[in-house]
Image (cartoon, rainbow, N blue to C red):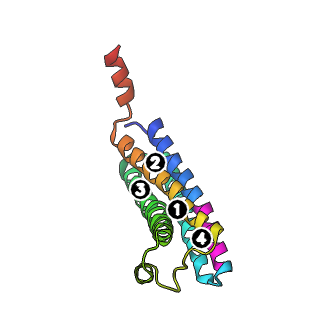
Amino acid sequence: MNNEVSLPVLRAAQRAVFGSVAVFAVTTVHHVYGAYIYNTPWRIHAAFVSGFATALIAALLQLLRKRPNGVIGVVASWAFVAVAFLIPFLAFGVFEGAYNHVLKVGLYFSHASPRLMAELYPRPAYEMPNNLFFEITGVTQVIPGVFTGYSLYRFVQDRRKPLNAVSDASVTAA
């Protein structure tokens, strides 16, 4: 049994970790700034959640690199995918970035009714767009979040392929 992770799998995993680190950085700036300007210290928890998730994702990658096959490798792979999918991609990229900021800003500037805005974005959890830096950093979370999601997709696709699939294809093509 081969005890290596294929290069495409490793690259996709490293990209997912990079995306998670980028989500963590943007999320930390966004939420610490938001906590300060809106006097809502509870916003800072997002930085801790994102930081913990990023550390866990990186640790799972290390475990996967050391033990890619067998039960440990399978569990590490699925835990890596689950954590990176749920937190950097879904929670911060899709929910926080896309719903909380892209949609909110889009609806606000398209003059959606105040009633709709209040239903979708109730106070005190949400602020209507009134600070450019806060909204830009909020929207920006989408970019590394989607990058992480795509990297996870590549990771899952490449992990399903046998390690020698590339070399077998090149032998048969020659």
Residue 9, how many percent across, how many down?
A: 44, 41
Contact (Cβ within 8 Å) of mark 2 with mark 4: no
Q: Residue at x 45, y 37 (%)?
A: 8
- Tell me the chief SS of the magenta region: helix
Q: Establish if 98 lies above or below 167.
A: below
Which residue bears the numbered disc 1? Answer: 56
Query: Residue extending furthest left?
Result: 172
Q: CA distance from mark 1 to mark 3?
A: 11 Å
At label 3, which amino acid type do we have?
A: Val
Residue 169, how many percent across, how many down?
A: 34, 23
Residue 28, how many percent across, how many down?
A: 62, 67
Which residue bears the numbered disc 3? Answer: 81
Q: CA distance from mark 2 to mark 3?
A: 10 Å
**Mark 1 secondary-structure assignment:** helix
Which residue bears the numbered disc 2? Answer: 151
At label 2, which amino acid type do we have?
A: Ser
Q: Would residue 146 be seen by someone viewing this image from the given angle?
A: yes
Of the residues under marks 2 and 4, which one precedes in the sequence?
4
At label 4, which amino acid type do we have?
A: Ala
Question: In the image, which residues are magenta?
Answer: 24-36
Looking at the image, is mark 4 or mark 3 nearer the viewer?
4
Q: CA distance from mark 4 to mark 3?
A: 20 Å
Looking at the image, is mark 2 or mark 1 nearer the viewer?
2
Q: Residue at x 65, y 84 (%)?
A: 39
Q: Which mark is residue 47?
A: 4
